[in-house]
Image (spheres, coloured by chain):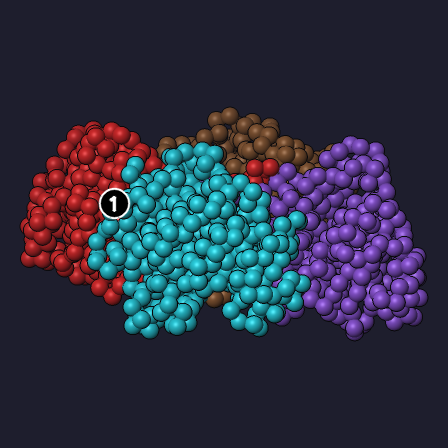
Chain colours: A red, B cyan, C purple, D brown
Amino acid sequence: MKIGLLGCGRIGQVHARSIGQIDGATVGAVADAFDEPAQALAKKTGAPAMSADELISNVDIDAVVIGTPTDTHYDLIHAACDAGKAIFCEKPVDMSATRIRECMDAVGKSGVAFMTAFNRRFDPNFANMQKRIVAGEIGSVELITILSRDPSPPPIGYIKQSGGLFRDMMIHDLDMARFLLGEEPVRIYAVGASLVDPEIGKAGDVDTAAVTLTTASGKICQISNSRRATYGYDQRIEVHGSIGMLRAENMLENTVEVATSNGFQRAPAQHFFLERYESAYRAEMAHFIASVKSPNAVTPSIQDGLCAQILADAATESLQIGKAIDLTSP
Amino acid sequence: MKIGLLGCGRIGQVHARSIGQIDGATVGAVADAFDEPAQALAKKTGAPAMSADELISNVDIDAVVIGTPTDTHYDLIHAACDAGKAIFCEKPVDMSATRIRECMDAVGKSGVAFMTAFNRRFDPNFANMQKRIVAGEIGSVELITILSRDPSPPPIGYIKQSGGLFRDMMIHDLDMARFLLGEEPVRIYAVGASLVDPEIGKAGDVDTAAVTLTTASGKICQISNSRRATYGYDQRIEVHGSIGMLRAENMLENTVEVATSNGFQRAPAQHFFLERYESAYRAEMAHFIASVKSPNAVTPSIQDGLCAQILADAATESLQIGKAIDLTSP
Amino acid sequence: MKIGLLGCGRIGQVHARSIGQIDGATVGAVADAFDEPAQALAKKTGAPAMSADELISNVDIDAVVIGTPTDTHYDLIHAACDAGKAIFCEKPVDMSATRIRECMDAVGKSGVAFMTAFNRRFDPNFANMQKRIVAGEIGSVELITILSRDPSPPPIGYIKQSGGLFRDMMIHDLDMARFLLGEEPVRIYAVGASLVDPEIGKAGDVDTAAVTLTTASGKICQISNSRRATYGYDQRIEVHGSIGMLRAENMLENTVEVATSNGFQRAPAQHFFLERYESAYRAEMAHFIASVKSPNAVTPSIQDGLCAQILADAATESLQIGKAIDLTSP
Amino acid sequence: MKIGLLGCGRIGQVHARSIGQIDGATVGAVADAFDEPAQALAKKTGAPAMSADELISNVDIDAVVIGTPTDTHYDLIHAACDAGKAIFCEKPVDMSATRIRECMDAVGKSGVAFMTAFNRRFDPNFANMQKRIVAGEIGSVELITILSRDPSPPPIGYIKQSGGLFRDMMIHDLDMARFLLGEEPVRIYAVGASLVDPEIGKAGDVDTAAVTLTTASGKICQISNSRRATYGYDQRIEVHGSIGMLRAENMLENTVEVATSNGFQRAPAQHFFLERYESAYRAEMAHFIASVKSPNAVTPSIQDGLCAQILADAATESLQIGKAIDLTSP
């Protein structure tokens, strides 16, 4: 199976590395709007660099990995659908739910396999939790707590184009909530403030936020985000069920503990997503490659991408108006 | 210092035991509406049993511990104020914020020391956290997460008279939020459902609930409660600050871990509040006795009791109307 | 049941406090070679101070707690046997195995109950481990690792009269080894050095030591001791069995963890034996009082005291000659 | 840099994978006594399969990785020395200390770089500990405890040719002891028994063993091994120093914990060495490749291989004669 990489930036390089470790898959071509990253990745993978159009229309390419800026996804998805290529697309599919619905239509009509790259579903810890929830190990899910903090905020220029914390950062947690709740949220309430960096507030965004989701049957999920954690990338989830509780702790830099008169000290959490989710990136690509032949089975689907975006939009609105928002099914 | 115990039930017995371990304090008299528990505690402590009126008017008694049913607090507080006795009063002071304000007036006029028994402030773990927050160890507080679950719900008869989960159970967490935030909440949003026991739902209450508090400066606190946790009394708090994070884990039954092919297993959490807060009960009584001579210094004060009740009332209303409630200062 | 306390020092005060918390037991009299501690404890307990002779011959006294200096144990045990009093005796029973055997004879002839106060057997963690080993939870015991470190060395004057590290400090671990192995050691090998304080070396003792015990069936136990641990009183044991492993971790000062750029830091271990073994002291006294009526059932017995002393003697000799010592059954 | 792989079994495949991830290094050729594994690894790496002689004499090959059976190491090392190739050699270099000395001479005369593959020195946890010890973080080392257990014993056929537990399994721990002690052991005492599988005992070997090492300055190291641990590959080390203690915990399969009425359960330890030491294998190969140009700087050196073998030999002898063995410097 030959895979064309659209986008040769940091995430494109991650996917290239993953593909290199999967038997039966190779990078077939690479493309980027800029020449330098395209040539660099071409050299590393041994695959030719070409334009996105050439790559998508190339008959040797079976599937495309879309890792380009978000505003280019829409056109690339439509082109790949037309060319009948399986699609692996970075989140968010698009900033507009309306446009994601249009992509959904195109995907549906073309019948190509489509996977929205919510990498955390493939983290060995969170995947293990979900499997055990489905297996009934903690009974029915009642309360979920998701704690997610980045080590430090991105540059203010990034923030301004990001769509805001809920669409850029919390969208991952909103997808995890759906993944673990096993039921769609029907109401969302969001709060937030700029406590980390006043520039973020001036840019109209928040850097500290919390959301409450509720489902029709009464399940509750609380999420909190901060753009800064001095102790590393903080990624924890716990799920309280009727007969037990599951929780996933952070992955630390190592297992060493030092004991002194100050007490017992362990290492910081792994620094950021490239370290923490290294195996998740590999597993999501392996999942895509393994399931691409049965298009309906690929998850997270484009619907999953849409649902998370709708939640992020509603959280943004809730924060603005200071009220809970009732959600209608997509 | 001689202390009169009003109420000889479970909590009165806890306080009697604490007093017995504090140098310079003794139980001077005990009273209960029922004869049997009064006689039993009299025998155990060596102090005489008498009526509440006799106890309060007894010139040998320096202070009273009110551990009677909530609806009797109001009259006992007024009587103790009239008699000039220092007062240690179990939470809630009263189910009505209006009546707590009337008690506050009586306490203020009489000048007696008054302590609202929010025992968790004296838990060695939570007290340690608060001290370190005040000392600036984690910078300014930004996000607080409070997870609180009882091992199993109380009898349905108790639920019906409890004032509801927010006033009966979460009130402790609401006080902890105020204790750790260092700033009054200005808005509250509550959700809840009856997931543990449908009888609780029929009785008009919830058994699973979550609250979000926000302060004027943008600090956020998320609280979640369940009336049932199969693994013991779950009492955890974490506070995310600008330069670090503090978290208090549960206290387990012991430190033993067994490793088998299933993995590494540690003991359940200490069963319930009598075990978990044993040292907190002792410390709160020691604090009361030590500070009773400077009435203004006694904390948690009756105002603290009022503030927590106002938050519990607002949470109850928020759940009913499905909207966030703006709070005004008491 | 009335208990006479022989010795009103630190350990006598611990036992007095424990007795005060056990229903059906009271301190009946106290005695000490010095007047001041005797009067202080008499005041605290409300029991009369008297001479050791008077106490032992007092018909109101049912049992004696021997917490005097080790060299006085021998005579007090004999006197108590003659007077038919049940005996609770601090470890070591005597510095000489020969003299312990003589005490054993006296106890045997008199038929009084005798308990050697190896408090660690009553630590909730270690007691829990032993119970689970006996219940077969980890199959047959194969390897035991005992790590035991004091927070700081005792005064050099104490060291000189202590009988050496193996008899003074490791004797507790040697008893724990016997408690958990379920089989008598047949060979012992000891190493040691003075690494903490050269004064200890000059006094002919070691402050850092390790012992290996083996049993006839091949079970192995490794013990290591240090007279100094900067992070508190370090008391850990792990037992590797055929179908699982049990380990007991330290008890920390609290459950709070702080996360900063240095990582995740928990509190130091509880400082020393009075804190760590507080509940063990209470449990051992309760066990003595509960079992005193069936003298043969009292454990740890005087034989246990003798066996531990023999192991400590052999370890001392092994270190001196640099060879393993074969043990014969006592 | 082109590397020739001698031996295409499990460990050869591990090294091939590592080399594939290191920039500037490639597998240049592969060789194996059997055709099938050689062809398989040739296909995977794209490198030609050839005989060991051809590989060693191939002018394109800069370095060889010796992962063949132990009894072939001696000849291959001599051949590689003659051909001037840098050598990465699996442990043990040879079963005979005399023959390792002869290899040392050949290496010394030829001036080629030589690395003994003690992979654990490159485990991120143990490497971190050693670095911090050298940096003085815990002061001077006093007591080391090494706990090492395999998940299950190897086939009895392997046991019979293994040289015994001390040379086959504990040799890694003996090297870790030297790595962390910072001083050569001067005395060793070993005990052991066959408790896991009587067949191992019948074959003249033990499956459960413990060793005590002491150095001239009095430092102590205790090691214990078992050939079976139901909870995974148990690899823990702790180092007690004058101003602190360092310990490395196991790496578990994931960070998920489940809480039920039985308590809190985490995952088993990673199953065995291929999982646990995956990153150590990568790091040791990267270290070899990076340091091969300065032959004297390569560690662990062939002397390290010799020293560990001498300790394993002495442990074997100590167990046989039941006595501590005095070591002389190699």
Residue A242, given in percent of the width and then of the height, sits at: 37, 67
The residue lying at 25 percent from left, 66 percent from top is A217
Query: In front: D2, or C208?
Result: C208
Instruction: Find the residue positioned furthest to the top.
Output: D294
Q: Is residue B135 visible?
A: yes
Residue D121 vertical position relative to residue B317 in the rendered view, above or below: above
Question: The N terminus of chain D is located in which quarter?
Answer: top left
The residue lying at 40 percent from left, 48 percent from top is B105
Q: Which residue is mark 1?
A: A191
Residue C75, given in percent of the width and then of the height, sits at: 93, 57
The residue lying at 65 percent from left, 67 percent from top is B43
Instruction: Please indicate whether residue C93 sits to the left or right of residue C14 in the image.
Output: right
Instruction: Please indicate whether residue B229 sits to the left or right of residue A64 in the image.
Output: right
Q: Is residue B253 visible?
A: no
Q: How many marks?
A: 1
Residue B154, given in percent of the width and then of the height, sits at: 42, 68
Query: In front: D324, or D30?
Result: D324
Please state which amino acid type lies under the numbered disc 1: Val
Instruction: Please indicate whether residue D184 sits to the left or right of residue A319 in the image.
Output: right
Residue C35, given in percent of the width and then of the height, sits at: 86, 46
The residue lying at 36 percent from left, 50 percent from top is B101
Question: The C terminus of chain D is located in which quarter?
Answer: top right
Q: Residues within 10 Å of mark 1 (few under 14, many from 20)?
A: many
